[in-house]
Every structure is written in C-alpha cells, then in structure tokens.
Amino acid sequence: MDIGKNQHMISEIKVTSLTPGIPFYGDPITLRVNGTEHTVYIEPRVTLLDALRERLGLTGTKKGCNHGQCGACTVLVNGQRINSCLTLAVMHIKQEITTIEGLAKGNELHPLQAAFIKHDAFQCGYCTSGQICSAVGMLNEGHATTDAQVQELMSGNLCRCGAYPNIVAAIQEAREQTRPCV
Amino acid sequence: MNPFSYVLVTEMGMAASAIANPTAKFIAGGTNLLDLMKEGVETPQQLVDINHLPLERVEVQADGAVRIGALAKNSDVAYHPVIQERYPMLSQAILAGASAQLRNMATVGGNLMQRTRCYYFNDTVSPCNKRVPGSGCPAIPGYNRIHAILGTSEECIATHPSDMCIALVALDAVVHTQGPNGDRTIPIGDFHLLPGNTPHLETLLEHEEMIVAVDIPPLPFATQSHYLKVRDRTSYAFALVSVAAALEIKDSIITNARVALGGVATKPWRASAAESVLIGAAVTEETFRTAASASVRDARPQQYNQFKIELAQRTIVRALKQVAAMQGEVV
C-alpha cells in the first residue's frame, strides 16, 4: 500500500485500536481532534505534532524547536496543555485533542482569540497558536490571577517578537470571559 | 528518531513481560526520553507505554508518610493540597522546573530518571564517558559553565538537572520499585549514583525494574521549607544553583535542618555538612554563612563554573534567611 499518496482510503483500511500487550509497528489509528475522528496510518515514532500537521493537515500548530523548549507546539489534550512535539500520536488514542483550529465556533472567535487581536498580542504570529492554546490550558488550570503569575505560568511559550506584555494583557481580559474548553 | 515498536500495557504483569526485552524502555510522560531519542542519545527498539497503570495517586499513609505514585504528574503533585501544606519545598521545586506544559506531561518516576543536560552528552558526535564508556569527557577541557562542582570525577562532571529530586533528597524520600527479583525500597540518597569511573551508570534501577511510588516520611518542620532556584532567566531554565531548605527553630536556636543543593552536583546533593553546622546553632547570618561555606568545602570547580562556588554559598544563605523569615526570625 502506498501510504504516501492517500491517507483516507478509509473504507479499505481496517481501523484498529491498540490491543494492550500486543506490539504496534504501524497501523491506522483513530485520533479525535477538535471533536472529529480522524484515521491516520502512522508508525509509533510519529509525534502528535507531526501527526496533526503532516497527516491531518492541521498546520495551525507550529513546530518551533521540536524539543519542548519553545511551546509553539502547545495543544490541549483532555483540556490540559501539553507540548505535542514531545509525545507520540499513538499515546493519545481515545483522548480529546484540541488544536488552535478547534477553538473558534464557526465564525465566532474564542474569547482569547478576540483578546489577542484586540490587544495586538502578536507580530509574526508564529508563536501565537501555541500562546493561545497554552493560555486556554492555563485558564482551565486556574492558578494564575496576577500579571506576574500569568507571566510565570506562560513562561513555556516563547515569543521572539517580544509581544509578551500584550499577550499578558489579552489573557487577563479574556480570563473574565473564558468558557470551559475540552 | 529510530523506528521502534510500541506496546501499551494495562497491568503490572504485562509491563514486566514487555520490559524483559533488553532493548525495550518504559515511556510515561516521555518528555526526556523522546527528547533524547530525537537526538539519537537513546535508541530503544521498543517503548512500553505504562501510562495506563494505576500508579498516579497521592495518598497519606497510616504512619503519616505521603506516598506519591510513580505516574503522578508533576503538576498534580505540585498543586496537591497535602504536598503544599506539609512539604512546600517540594511543591515549589516542581513548579520551579520546566514549563507548565511539561509539568502536565512529566511524571514523578520520569523526573527521578531524567538525564543530564551536558552539551556533550546530548551531542552524539562528541565523545562522552556517560554515553560511550571510555570515550573521554570533552566537558572537562571544554565549555563547562553548567557543569558540577560537587561529586565529580576524572571521567564525568555532568550536573543532575532535576529540581524535584533536590526536595526529595532534603526530605529523605524513599523510592519503591517492583521487578523480577521482587519489590524493594531505595533511599533517595542511594538511588542516584556518583559518576566515579562508571558515569554510564546513573541510578540503582535495574533494567527490568519499575519505580512504582515515592514515599515522603513525615517531617513536621518541613512546613517551614522553601526552594530557591537561581538561573540565567527568570523562568523556564535549568538551575545554576538551587537550594531546598527547611529549618526548625525554637527560641532562636536551630533545632533541626534540611539542606539540599541542585545545579552544582552530579547527583541531587544532600548538604549534610551544612546541616551539621546549622543544628544547635543560633539563627544568625554568621551561622548561615558558616553552613554555606561548609557545603562547598570539597567543591572542585572547572574553568567556566568557578562562579558556582560563591553563588552556591550566597544562595544557601538567602534560602536559609527566607525560611527563617517564614517563622518570624529576622536574620
């Protein structure tokens, strides 16, 4: 089978879920992303980041450093923020994965997205997907209230353009309005 | 990353048979292992996913000890009310490390097992006695600013990078493991090894052994504890020097003390010499300085990390002052 050409020959591929104790070498697996189930044929070594970008075409999540040091790859898994570059796609079957593409409801922006625009919280935009997903996760965690706490708990997201003050301002405004996000 | 097979396990027995494969490794959070695999430093042929084992709880035992399951996430431990109340240094140490995203992924067991950030260890083109025994240590004649001043040998000066482990060492934690030869308990001070002439051996853990829990003994005065981390950045960087400190003070005399150091040693470092100076002494700056000086008496600096000797002393003094201030002692 030529797996390079067409990932979506779903009707011909038997979708398997992992059987505990049985080694997995590469097979179609099901990932739930932004509320939709996707089938991807991958090897175990495909990171969640690469599965999202390269296999599912969800390129909103960025590869910045690929080593868990910049936060550009931040996504939400079961509502919790993680670095998708340092985890394997196969480890997240049956979990709810939310990427930047999944935050808006149709044309209605997520409050954080609207706040980032209002407060000019990005320049080049490369860190922005990770910043917003990380901020959603941080607000779900509920430990940050002051600006200093927001800065500290967002420290896993680097911004080479230096939009930090505006990022903090955007987060603080959205903190009042954020709805729970899975 | 090299190709590998992946096995999901849901029971200890399944994990035990999977790890019997000498080329297999457990994966939990994966935040260190996958990073090392991307660099080619670790090349397991099979990963055994243990995340579904029921080892994530934090529970108070009958004797007052707190048992932390090996799969408890760093963030869950740091924010756990029992940990925050009884062992604030541990909560602070964990929150001082990595980033929120990484703390959500990383487990206690994995944090114990994390490997050094030495540039040469992480670069497979470089010789490295830890990675390739006998190949040499390029850090000793090389750029060694982040390397150790304590616990070093002629073969290795790599710093142990964990924050969590510094607090665990100060608290006399005990590591519980399960393996083919049965269950055993390993005091945290023995768990990590000095490099000596076997820098490739970092812990007492056997290949087929799994960490299942970490017990923290009851220590009432640990409520008066603090973790102070000094680094090049305000956040999200490894320690140049870090100090975990706890003081029990009665009538301005230190009746008990725990001090451990990070960022300066080849394994998480219990500063027993400092504790000996502190216990029984008056709560004064001079006492703190004497204790700090004792803790670096055997320090062996390298060309680029000599500053750590002074920085470690100042950080120890500041950390002790902070703990004293928590109890109303102005030093």
Image (cartoon, coloured by chain):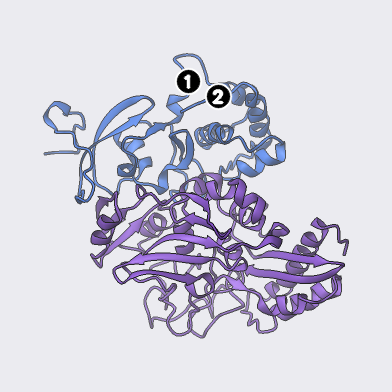
Chain colours: A blue, B purple
A74 displayed left or right of B92: left
Q: What residue is shown at x 21% (from left), y 48% (from top)?
A: A24
Q: Which residue is mark 2?
A: A113
Residue placed most toward the observer, B323 or B158: B323
Q: Which residue is mark 1?
A: A104
Q: What residue is shown at x 19% (from left), y 37% (from top)?
A: A16
Indicate the amino acid at tag 1: Ala
B278 displayed left or right of B269: right
Q: What residue is shown at x 74% (from left), y 72% (from top)?
A: B313
Image position of B296 with respect to B125: above or below: below
Q: Earlier in the sequence, mark 1 or mark 2?
A: 1
Q: Quadrant of the C terminus of chain B?
A: bottom right
Residue placed most toward the observer, B81 or B18: B81
Q: Secondary structure at mark 2?
A: helix
- Alpha carbons under labels 1 and 2: distance apart: 8 Å
**Residue B45 shows in this picture:** no
Residue under disc 1 on the same chain as residue under disc 2: yes
In percent of width and height, residue A171 lies at 63, 30
Q: Chain of mark 2?
A: A
Q: Which mark is residue B181?
A: none
